[in-house]
Image (spheres, rainbow, N blue to C red):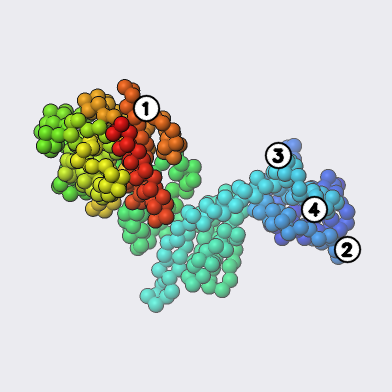
C-alpha cells in the first residue's frame, strides 16, 4: 500500500486521484489523510507525514469523468467527514472501470453516502447565505472607505464556496467573512482565503444595528411564528451572531397578546352600523312582515338564538317573509349584507335577480314565501366591505330546526331550494345540484322539492355559463309553479 497521501482540498485530491487512476492503482491500495484531520494509530499518535500527493510526470492522461460526478465530488470534498477522500476515490475508480452505468444505481451505498454528504454541504452553504450578518468597521480617517466584517461558524469546509454568493451580492463593497477555519476577504477585485483574525477583535455591533432590529420587529408577524419549525430551520447556535435574534424571545412571548389585539382591531374594523349583537344587551327585533309569515315572536326568538357563533358578527337574524298560505316556499342560503342591515330576505342584488326570474317563470313573488336555510349573515372583512362567506355544515345544521318550523307552519305544496346549502339542509346529502335537478324529490308529508341554482351563482358566473344557468332556473321555477297549481 502507498504511504498516506495528504490532501487538503478538492483540487489537491483531484490531482492525486488523476495520477492514481492513470497508474491503475485500486482504492484498496490507497490511504488518504488530511493534514487538518490527522489519522491516529492504536496508541493515539498521529501517522508520520507521507509524501504529498502530486501527479506522476510520466503518467498517461486519465480517462474523462462525467460532469455530474465531478460536481458531486466537489461538494463531498467540502464535508468534514474524514473518510470522504476514500469514498470519493472509490466512486471515481468504479466509474473509471465500469463507465457511466456505475452512477445509475440509486440504491448503491457509496453513491447514497456521497449524495447525503453533498446535501449536508449544500445545506451548510445555504445557512451561510441566510445567517451571515455584516457589521461596519469605520476607517482610520473620515474619508476612508468603510469595510464590513462578519463572523460565521460553518459545520463544514464551505467558506470559499459560500463566499462566492456575497461576491455577487456585495461586489461593490469591501468585506471579510471570518470563520474558525479561516477568513474570506473581498477587496473588490479578488476573493482571498486568509488566516482568521482573533474572534475578539471583531465588532459586536455597529451604528445600523438598532435600526435593523427595529425594522425586524416591525415586519415580523409574531402570530405566524412556530417555534419548533423556526428552530429546525434556524438552530439557536446561529442566534448569537444575528442582531435580530435578540428580539425573538420577546416576539414569541408577546405573540398571544398581539393576536388578541389583531382580533379586536378586526372586529372594530366594521363600521358602527355593523356592530355585533351581544348576549348581554337587548336583541333587536326583525321587521314584522305586515302580518305575513314570521311575526314578532318568531323574530325575537331568532335573534335570541345562540346555537352557533354567527350571531356575534351579524346585525340581526333575518326571518322569512311572505303570506301564511303560500303554496311555494323559496329557500336560499343565508342573508346578504343588505338583508342583514334591512332585516328582510332577498332584498339585495340576488333578490332583485330572483324577482326577474320569477316574473319570467310566471310566478308572483307576492304569493311566495322566501326564507333562508341560515338566518344570520356570515361574512369576512375586505377593507370597508363585508363579503359573503359560505356557512359551514354545523352552522346550517344549527339553523335547520328554524327552517323546519317554518315549513311545518306553512304546509306548502312545493319547496324550491336555491343553491347547495339549502339543498343539503333539506335533503341531508351533498349531491350536486345538476344531479338533483334530474330527479323527482319529495319532503315528508308529500311536499314536492325542486332544487335549482342560487341567483348569486348567476351573478358570479361567466356570461355564457350564466345564460345557461338562467334558463335552467326559469325552467325549474315554472315547474314549481305548475306543481303548486295542481
Assess disc 1: are there few (<14), some (14-19) or many (≥20) residues with their C-alpha within 10 Å of its C-alpha.
Answer: some
Query: Which one is in front, 348 or 254?
Result: 348
Assess disc 3: are there few (<14), some (14-19) or many (≥20) residues with their C-alpha within 10 Å of its C-alpha.
Answer: few
| Disc assigned to residue 442 | 1
User: In the rendered view, would you say 345 is above or below 244?
Assistant: above
Assess disc 2: are there few (<14), some (14-19) or many (≥20) residues with their C-alpha within 10 Å of its C-alpha.
Answer: few
Badge 4 is on which residue? 100
Relative to 239, is 74 on the left or the right? right
Q: CA distance from mark 2 to mark 1?
A: 91 Å
Nearer to us of marks 1 and 4 is 1
Contact, CB < 8 Å: mark 2 with mark 4?
A: no
User: In the rendered view, would you say 418 is above or below 152?
Assistant: above
Which of pointers 2 and 4 lies earlier in the amino acid sequence?
2
SS for callout 2: loop
SS for callout 3: loop
| Disc assigned to residue 44 | 3
Contact, CB < 8 Å: mark 1 with mark 4?
A: no
Relative to 271, is 468 on the left or the right? right
Residue 276 visible within the image:
no
State the image coordinates of residue 220 (x, y, percent, origin top left). 35, 51
Query: Toward which corner of the image does residue 404 lie, by quadrant?
Result: top left
Badge 2 is on which residue? 60
Amino acid at each position: 500500500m502507498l504511504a498516506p497521501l495528504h490532501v487538503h482540498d478538492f483540487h489537491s485530491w483531484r490531482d492525486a486521484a488523476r495520477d492514481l487512476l492513470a497508474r491503475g492503482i485500486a482504492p484498496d491500495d490507497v490511504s488518504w489523510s488530511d493534514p487538518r484531520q490527522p489519522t491516529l494509530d492504536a496508541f493515539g499518535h498521529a501517522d508520520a507525514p507521507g509524501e504529498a500527493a502530486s501527479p506522476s510526470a510520466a503518467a498517461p492522461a486519465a480517462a474523462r469523468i462525467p460532469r455530474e460526478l465531478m460536481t458531486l465530488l466537489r461538494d463531498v470534498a467540502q464535508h468534514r467527514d474524514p473518510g470522504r477522500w476514500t469514498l470519493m476515490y472509490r466512486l471515481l475508480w468504479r466509474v473509471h472501470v465500469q463507465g457511466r452505468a456505475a452512477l445509475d444505481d440509486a440504491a448503491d451505498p457509496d453513491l447514497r453516502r456521497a449524495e447525503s454528504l453533498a446535501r449536508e454541504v449544500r445545506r451548510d452553504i445555504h445557512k451561510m447565505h441566510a445567517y451571515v450578518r455584516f457589521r461596519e468597521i469605520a476607517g482610520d480617517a473620515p474619508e476612508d472607505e468603510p469595510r464590513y466584517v462578519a463572523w460565521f461558524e460553518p459545520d463544514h469546509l464551505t467558506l470559499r464556496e459560500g463566499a462566492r454568493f456575497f461576491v455577487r451580492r456585495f461586489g461593490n463593497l469591501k468585506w471579510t467573512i471570518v470563520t474558525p477555519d479561516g477568513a474570506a476577504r473581498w477587496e473588490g477585485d479578488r476573493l482571498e482565503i486568509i488566516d482568521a483574525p482573533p474572534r475578539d477583535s471583531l465588532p459586536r455591533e455597529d451604528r445600523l444595528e438598532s435600526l435593523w432590529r427595529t425594522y425586524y420587529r416591525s415586519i415580523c408577524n409574531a402570530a405566524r411564528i412556530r417555534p419548533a419549525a423556526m428552530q429546525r430551520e434556524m438552530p439557536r447556535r446561529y442566534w448569537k451572531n444575528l442582531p435580530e435574534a435578540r428580539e425573538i424571545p420577546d416576539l414569541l412571548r408577546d405573540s398571544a397578546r398581539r393576536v388578541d389585539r389583531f382580533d379586536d382591531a378586526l372586529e372594530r374594523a366594521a363600521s358602527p352600523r355593523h356592530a355585533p349583537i351581544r348576549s348581554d344587551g337587548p336583541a333587536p327585533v326583525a321587521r314584522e312582515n305586515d302580518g305575513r309569515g314570521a311575526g314578532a315572536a318568531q323574530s325575537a326568538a331568532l335573534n335570541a338564538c345562540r346555537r352557533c357563533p354567527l350571531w356575534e358578527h351579524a346585525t340581526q337574524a333575518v326571518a322569512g317573509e311572505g303570506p301564511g298560505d303560500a303554496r311555494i316556499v323559496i329557500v336560499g342560503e343565508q342573508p346578504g349584507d343588505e338583508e342583514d342591515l334591512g332585516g328582510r330576505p332577498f332584498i339585495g342584488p340576488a333578490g332583485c335577480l330572483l324577482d326577474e326570474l320569477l316574473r319570467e317563470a310566471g310566478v308572483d313573488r307576492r304569493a311566495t314565501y322566501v326564507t333562508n336555510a341560515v338566518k344570520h349573515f356570515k361574512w369576512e372583512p375586505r377593507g370597508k366591505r363585508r363579503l359573503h362567506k359560505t356557512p359551514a355544515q354545523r352552522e346550517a345544521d344549527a339553523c335547520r330546526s328554524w327552517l323546519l318550523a317554518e315549513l311545518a307552519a306553512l304546509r306548502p305544496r312545493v319547496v324550491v331550494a336555491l343553491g347547495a346549502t339549502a339543498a343539503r339542509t333539506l335533503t341531508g346529502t351533498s349531491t350536486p345540484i345538476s344531479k338533483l335537478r334530474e330527479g323527482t324529490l319529495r319532503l315528508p308529508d308529500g311536499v314536492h322539492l325542486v332544487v335549482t341554482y342560487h341567483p348569486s351563482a348567476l351573478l358570479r358566473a361567466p356570461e355564457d355559463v350564466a345564460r345557461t344557468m338562467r334558463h335552467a332556473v326559469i325552467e325549474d321555477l315554472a315547474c314549481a309553479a305548475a306543481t303548486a297549481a295542481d
